Every structure is written in C-alpha cells, then in structure tokens.
Image (cartoon, rainbow, N blue to C red):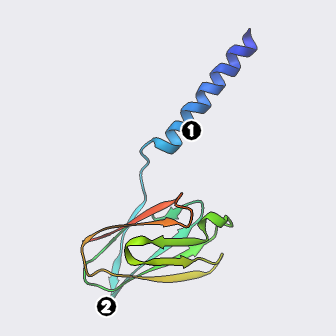
Amino acid sequence: MMTRLIVLIVGLALIGFIIWWFFGKHEAQSEVAEVTGDTQTVDVEVNGGYSPEKIVLKKGVPAVLNFTRKDPSSCLDRVVFADFGINQALPQNQTVPIKIDTSKAGEYPWACGMDMFHGKVEVK
C-alpha cells in the first residue's frame, strides 16, 4: 500500500514537471543589439536551445546574427527564418553569420529545422 502511494506521488510530481516544462511561461533571455559603425551584431549560442532567444534590432541598420552551434543534436543543425526565406545549416563548433533584413519593423520568429526550439527577432 505504501509503495503504491509513493509511486502515485512521484508520478503526479513528474506529470506536473512535464506540464510546467512544456506549457509554462519561461523567461526568455533577451538581448538588444549594439550598433557598431554601420552594423549591428549579436552572437547566438546554440546549445540545448538558443541563447539569447529574443533579439531586439534597430530598424534600418544592417544586422548580422552569429550562430554558433555547440549542441551535437541533429535537431539544432539548421536555423530557419521563414519570414526571410532563410534555411541555414549550422555546422557544430563553427560560427555562421546570418544577415537579417531590418527594413521593416516587426517580430520575426526563427526555429530549428524540426520546429522544436524557437527564438524571435524584434525590429524596432
């Protein structure tokens, strides 16, 4: 009887954790790009997701996001910006610069090749 109760409690705790992990609101790491000269750049680390997940860019200033994939997972071996027609391979342990169109203000999501991990660029 006690074993069943312990298994039930552990099971419910695990279910609660899974629901929180997948459906809970998590604070996304955000970064505002610094403009240097006539370009703005942000380094994005790809390791179990994207860091930062949200990037704020200044409208009208050419922008480059430097993606460096450290994660060996095949899920994260591509980054897709559907709004910009970008589907770029990310070789492991290499920095890949991706130019972002900042001519129009708005929010532009990106995702891994399997659409499991996400990020967002906000052009202001």
The structure residue drawn at horizontal position 41% and vertical position 45%, both measured from the top left corner, is 25
Q: Residue 30, relative to residue 40: is it above or below?
A: above
Between tags 2 and 1, which lies in front?
1
85 or 8, nearer to the observer = 85
Name the residue furthest top. 1
Of the numbered discs in the image, which one, if any, rests on residue 18? Answer: 1
Residue 19 can be seen, yes or no: yes
> Is residue 54 visible in this depiction of the protein?
no
Q: Is mark 1 on a helix, strand or loop?
A: helix
Q: In this view, does 83 lie above or below 9?
A: below
Q: In which quarter of the image is residue 37?
A: bottom left
Which quadrant of the figure has residue 45? Answer: bottom right
Measured Cα–Cα span from mark 2 to mark 1: 45 Å
Please, what is the three-letter code of the amino acid marked with disc 1?
Ile
SS state under label 2: loop
Circle 1: is it few (<14), some (14-19), or many (20+) Cα within 10 Å? Answer: few
Q: Looking at the figure, which quarter contains the C terminus?
A: bottom left
Up/down of 3 relative to 120, above or below? above
Residue nearest the observer in this picture, 92 or 33: 92
Quadrant showing the N terminus: top right
Residue at 59% over, 60% down: 48
Q: Earlier in the sequence, mark 2 or mark 1?
A: 1
Rendered location of residue 68, percent (x, y) = 57, 75
Q: What residue type is labelled 2?
A: Asp
Q: Residue 38 carries which label?
A: 2
Taking the image as shown, residue 87 lies to the left or right of residue 100, namely: right
Q: Label 2 crowding class (10 Å Cα cut-off): few <14, some 14-19, many 20+?
A: few
Q: Quadrant of residue 57?
A: bottom left
